[in-house]
Amino acid sequence: MAVIAVCAAVLLAQPVGAIMRHAELTLVEIEDSTSPAGGATIGIQLDAPLPVLGVQLDLAYDSSVCRVTGISEGSYFAFKKTEPLGLTFFHPGIPDDESGTVTKLASCRLQGETLAVKGTNNVATFVVEPVQPGTTCGPEDVTITSVMVVNDDGLVVVATGAYADKYMYLVPLGKTI
């Protein structure tokens, strides 16, 4: 009981909005000449000022307007040429055009000298294409509905949507998020 009280006290001592400062995910349109007519290539951009070990998220879209295709790994967790080679994990998620969702899209580093990464780059990219000819769709037609971000200590530091019910924000003493 004392551990929960200490963790809660550390969490409550954070200023409003502190939890979301650890990482922010946004959808950004990427200029791509191969995007389908009326569609767009979209990046799921992670901006993390502190080291992040991995991300899992869900997307929602209006399936009467758009279709999501071509989900691929972004370069956020990719190893740079100056780093020793390592291993990354990417799961493109489970797309369901009937319900208009992509669930459990995940990316992380599994093996390497440095596992946690900070900075800004795309975790994944995907293409949206219109269902009806002559119509358009883009980032404004897609929503990130649930997010889970794991820090360099292996703790879930951001959990929203479907993940919020499953994870409690635990902040080790002496650490900030």
Image (cartoon, grey):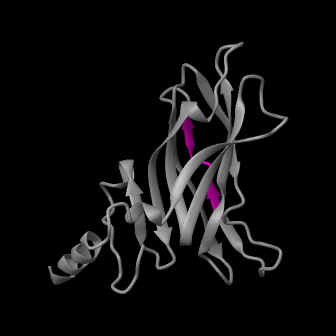
The vertical placement of 147 against 36, above or below, is below
Task: Report the side of 131 relative to 9 (left or right).
Answer: right
Residue depicted at x 72% and y 60%: 75
Q: Please state, as top left, top right, bottom left or bottom right, where the N terminus lies in the image.
A: bottom left
- Looking at the image, residue 88 lies above or below residue 161: below
As drawn, which residue projects farthest toward the left?
1
Residue 137, x across and y down, in percent: 64, 26
The secondary structure making up most of the magenta span is strand
Say which of 159 and 70 sits in front. 159
What is the tally of numbered marks visible in this picture?
Answer: 0
Q: Which quarter of the figure has residue 95?
A: top right
Q: Position of residue 12 (x, y in %)?
A: 25, 70
Identify which residue is drawn at 51% across, 57% down. Answer: 24
Q: Position of residue 151 (x, y in %)?
A: 49, 72
Q: Quadrant of residue 32?
A: top right
Horizontal side of 150 relative to 160 (left or right) equals right
Q: Nearer the viewer, residue 137 or 162?
A: 137
Residue 109 vs 114, above or below: the answer is above
Query: Which residue sits furthest bottom?
Result: 174
Residue depicted at 45% across the width and 58% down the height = 148
- In front of the other: 119 or 131: 119
* Residue range corresponding to the magenta coloring: 89-96
- Comparing 167 with 42, the one in front is 42
Quadrant holding the C terminus: bottom left
